[in-house]
Image: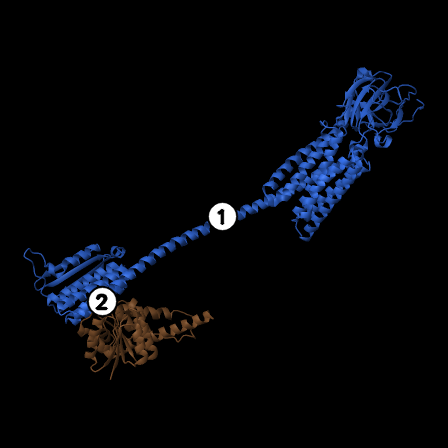
Chain colours: A brown, B blue
Amino acid sequence: MMNILLLEDLPQIRAWLSSLVMQVFPGAQIAEAARVHDALGLVSAIKFDLALVDLGLPDGSGVDVVTALREHQPETQSVVVTIHDDDEHLFPALQAGAFGYILKEQARELIVEQLQRISQGEPPLSPSIARRVMAYFTAKAKPQAASPSTMPLVSLTDRETEVLLRVAKGYTLPEIGLQLSLSRHTIADYVKQIYRKLNVSSRAEAALEAQRMGLFGR
Amino acid sequence: MQRACHPLTARRRGHGPVGASLTWLLQCVLPLLMGLQVSVAGAQPPQSVRVHAAQAVVSDSVSFPAAPAPQVVDLPDDWSLSRPGSNGPVWYRVGFTAPGLAERGELLALYIEHVCTNLEVYLNGQLLHRGGRMHEPITQNCNHPQLISLPAGLITEGTNALDIKVVGHALARVSSRQRAGGLSALDIGPLSVLEPVYARQRALNVTVPQAVSATLLLMGSFMFVLGWMNRRESHLAYFGALSVGWAIVESRLWLRDLPIDNAVSELLLCAMLPLLAMACIQFLLRYAQYRSRLLDIALPLQCLVVPASLLLAGPERLNLLASFWYAMLALQTLAAAAFYLRTQYHSRTRSFWPMALLLGIACVALLVEYLSQHLGVRSPWSHVARIATPVMMVLVGLRLLQQQGRALQVAEQSNAQLEQRIREATTEIERNFAQLAELRVEKVTERERKRIAADLHDDLGAKLLTIVHTSESERISTLAREALEEMRLSVRGLTGKPVQLIDALGDWRAEVVSRLRQAGIEADWQTPADELTQTLSARAFVQTTRILRESVSNVIKHSSATHCSVGCSIVDGDLQVVVHDNGKGIPMEVDGRLDRGHGMSSMKQRAKQLQGQCLVESGPGYGTVIRLTLPLNRATEAA
């Protein structure tokens, strides 16, 4: 039986999402929360398979819940459900370990389809997010001679970069699969890998930053 | 009277290369009138004769007194030796003959190198010359050589009697031996011979001290003002005071008539000396960067003690006490000079040797002056010494001025540097401030936009979202969804930064192609292959996105098309977007215009706002073509 966390502050939307999740994952156990605080409590109590997390909540940001899930339940798939479609809002959540995102206002069928794809390991990737990811890794690839040993160097492969580049130009994933003569699953694997590397690199960076702060704080 | 012929010697004095072997016959006229007599004119070229002896008698009579009997004295006659304590007046008489004078038509003259304090000269009982007031306050002629021409008409062929009445002061009553009563040797001879001698002596005794006084006064007052203005340079003020004081003391050498008695003028002069010493000592100490509280009090106190002690001692002991104070003051000054030189030597300043030389010369000169005054040694060196001290002072003054000038220069330079630095700093601050202000405005604006955006998302977005998912009507859901998208775009236009055209094309392609595919319409997207460097303002991006979205919506909803191509290109710096479908086209209204229900007018309006245009062509079997042209640079600027 599947355990699913649903964090959403608007009751009606939460109910609607709940019914939607039941449709995609029949028989799943859904734990609902309206606030970050409640969600964090649930995370420490229940082991989830999937988490749908809204970002803008009354008592904070859903990114904290994503981070906590990544920390305590690395197996859980966190999916951001939001009305923010811009990379400003999404990128931090993806860095924190979110595996894909869903825009709430889309039609039910679309969301269902996307949710299914995500759960099957095919997260969506918009051009602006792709650009942001590329910029992130490009900046990191630039010589940071200060800490090559302390930081595990996570970098994208040429293929992953190629995929990102094409996504940024507006090509859909199936199109890219055709262009590169790759199967839909292989492309999806690249995207998954990109998400994973983004999270790993961000976490390493955060750890390094924390270490540095500790050193300074001494 | 009882005296017999007194053996006299006369030394010749003159220009001509006359043999020293020539002796002059001196006629001793024994009994009555003349005690002494010299012959000053002969067949030889004009010569002068120095008289080394004279009859002398102390008397205040109006003419050479008949009684008491005169004594024969050597000249120079220093009263302090020949008649200690006497204040005169003393009559002197010298006899001379000048044979053959009338034939040569030569004018004779009497030259007296030194007479103190004042004199009257009579020739054969006739008053020839009076040096000034003969009673207190007596005209001070001690430093003034005297040249009195002897009118030929008064000179007889026989023996002539030259009477000189001298008034003066006993040594005890004056502070300097120079002003003690006395008479030097007399020179009698042709005026032409004696005049240059007189002129030289006068220049040395009077003109030089006058020049020195003037110079010191000028320099001193200048330095004093300089030091007074700048308290950190107080040594300059003291040096100025020293110079001015010296000038005043020096004026006693050439200033003849004072409206005050000798006793008072001597007292005032003596009172000046501790002041001078104080100025000198303080100058040296301050110049060596040393300041002593004790001396600051002790030296002014001394300036009071000295005149007070002299006043108490009375005029008869003036010389004695003044000598004591001279010595004391000289020692103090010497000690200060030694102290100064020691500090300079230890700090190894470059000015040590020049200053040591100047101070050394001044000290030696002072010593010579002291010796000549108090031991009665009269030598040409005393003249040199008297001039050397003020000359050294002038040199020291010049040195100080040079230092001051250099310091001024340095100060000006550093001032200029400072000003330059301040100017730079000011510019920097202004620039920083402007940047800060700009930043702050940007920051505030940014924050405000973010707040509005967040509010829109949280309130409006949440409500619209609820409508989207709870409305029974599909139409309302769609409307609300569109409104939500619009709101999101508006927020982006509000907060967004300029967008790279190539990124915008990527976003548009992703949206257009996926929407058309979802609707089952074949999509064809064409973009320029070359690198694009242009940017779009957030507003232009948002508006263009809306126009594109509207076009695609129209294609999906109304055209029944199976294929749609979207081409983006750069034509003459304009962005051109052409959306072409193979649908049924837009139905014509009755008046021949295209249906407004398809949002055409809002598309056109938006294009117009960006200084572009949106053309719609449609026809049956042809489909619809929407041509959007945006001037890129202007659209970019329209932020």
Q: Is residue B620 left or right of residue B112?
A: left
Which residue corresponds to mark 2?
B462
Q: Residue at x 11, y 65 (%)?
A: B558
Kind of residue sitting beneath label 1:
Glu
* B553, A109: nearer the viewer: A109
State whether residue B478 is above or below residue B608.
below
> Residue B34, percent across and down?
88, 20
Q: Can you name the residue that lies furthest to the front here?
A: B312
State whether residue B1 is above or below residue A78.
above
Quadrant of residue B458 within the rendered picture: bottom left
The reply to whether residue B156 is in sight is yes
* A38, B12: nearer the viewer: A38
Residues behind callouts 1 and 2 on a single chain: yes
- How many dots with numbers? 2
Q: Residue at x 63, y 39 (%)?
A: B224
State whether residue B141 is above or below residue B66.
below
Answer few, some or many: residues within 10 Å of disc 2's Cα (few below 14, many 20 plus, some between 14 and 19): many
State the CA–CA distance, disc 1 to disc 2: 62 Å
Badge 2 element:
helix
Quadrant of residue A140 within the rendered picture: bottom left
Badge 1 element:
helix
Q: Can you name the residue that lies furthest to the left here?
A: B590
Q: Quadrant of the N terminus of chain A?
A: bottom left
Q: Is residue B258 left or right of residue B21?
A: left
Q: Is residue B520 left or right of residue B51?
A: left
Q: Is residue B511 left or right of residue B241?
A: left
Quadrant of residue B565 within the rendered picture: bottom left
Q: Which mark is first along the chain, 2 or 1?
A: 1
Kind of residue sitting beneath label 2:
Ala
Chain that bears disc 1: B
Which residue corresponds to mark 1?
B419
